[in-house]
């Protein structure tokens, strides 16, 4: 079993983001099967066709990090029954990478958490649709996590055994699918 390079995209820019905590705990569940890189999205300029001729440095970095990964784990909050603008902006930039979208053929898993009862179900549904249209191989299965203050302990581990077991199975499935579908990364050229 080889180690997978997983780009982790957190759809929140909040310093104490519960979705970042969830993402870190999920990576821990991946153990030695995962080499995770948390991909920054808060420094990307708002997408504009006017910037496409010479992609800004932050965009080139983002494209290279996603293109170089074997798979992508997206962990997002839900804003107004959809995904946050910062995450949609990153997806839009990645779809305009040269010579091709960084999302095409990329295995993706989607989850997220919020204090609400349905977690981030609607944001995840929108994200599945968007990434699917862009050619990502979005993993089936759903992980809607209602965040409680004691969900993750100070060591970054899940405190509830049934939640941990559920998310362990989710991560195991994601990593197994990504290993089977692992494809060579597309070349991303400087604009």
Image (cartoon, rainbow, N blue to C red):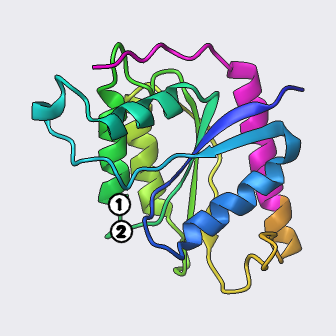
State left or right for residue 14 relative to residue 169: left
Asked if residue 156 lies left or right of residue 100, the reply is right
Q: Earlier in the sequence, mark 2 or mark 1?
A: 2
Spot occupied by residue 140 in the image (x, y as percentages of width and height)? 62, 40
According to the picture, the residue beneath numbered tag 1 turns out to be 84
Q: Secondary structure of the magenta portion, mostly? A: helix
Q: Are marks 2 and 1 in contact (CB under 8 Å)?
A: yes
Q: Position of residue 129 (x, y in %)?
A: 40, 41
**Which image quarter holds the N terminus?**
top right
The residue that appears at 58% across and 55% down in the rendered structure is 111
- Badge 1 local density, few (<14 within 10 Å), some, or many (20+)? some
| Residue 48 located within the stretch drawn in magenta | no
In front here: 133 or 68? 68
Label 2: which residue? 79
Q: CA distance from mark 2 to mark 1?
A: 6 Å
167 over 114 or under it: above or below: above
Q: Give the magenta-colored segment's residue range.
A: 166-191
Secondary structure of the residue carrying tag 2 is loop
Kind of element beneath mark 1: loop
């Amino acid at each position: 079993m080889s180690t997978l390079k997983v780009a982790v995209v957190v759809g929140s820019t909040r310093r104490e983001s519960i979705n970042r905590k969830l993402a870190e705990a999920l990576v821990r569940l991946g153990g030695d099967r995962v080499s995770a890189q948390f991909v920054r999205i808060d420094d990307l300029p708002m997408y504009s066709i006017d910037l496409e001729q010479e992609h800004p440095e932050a965009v080139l970095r983002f494209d290279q990090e996603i293109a170089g990964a074997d798979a992508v784990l997206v962990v997002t909050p839900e804003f107004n029954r959809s995904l946050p603008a910062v995450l949609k902006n990153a997806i839009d930039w990645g779809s305009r990478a040269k010579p091709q979208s960084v999302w095409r053929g990329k295995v993706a898993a989607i989850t997220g958490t919020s204090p609400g009862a349905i977690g981030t179900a609607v944001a995840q549904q929108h994200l599945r649709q968007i990434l699917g249209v862009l050619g990502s191989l979005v993993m089936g299965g759903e992980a809607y996590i209602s965040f409680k203050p004691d969900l993750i302990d100070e060591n970054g581990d899940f405190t509830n055994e049934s939640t941990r077991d559920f998310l362990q199975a989710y991560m195991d499935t994601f990593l197994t699918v990504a290993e089977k579908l692992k494809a060579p990364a597309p070349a991303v050229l400087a604009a």
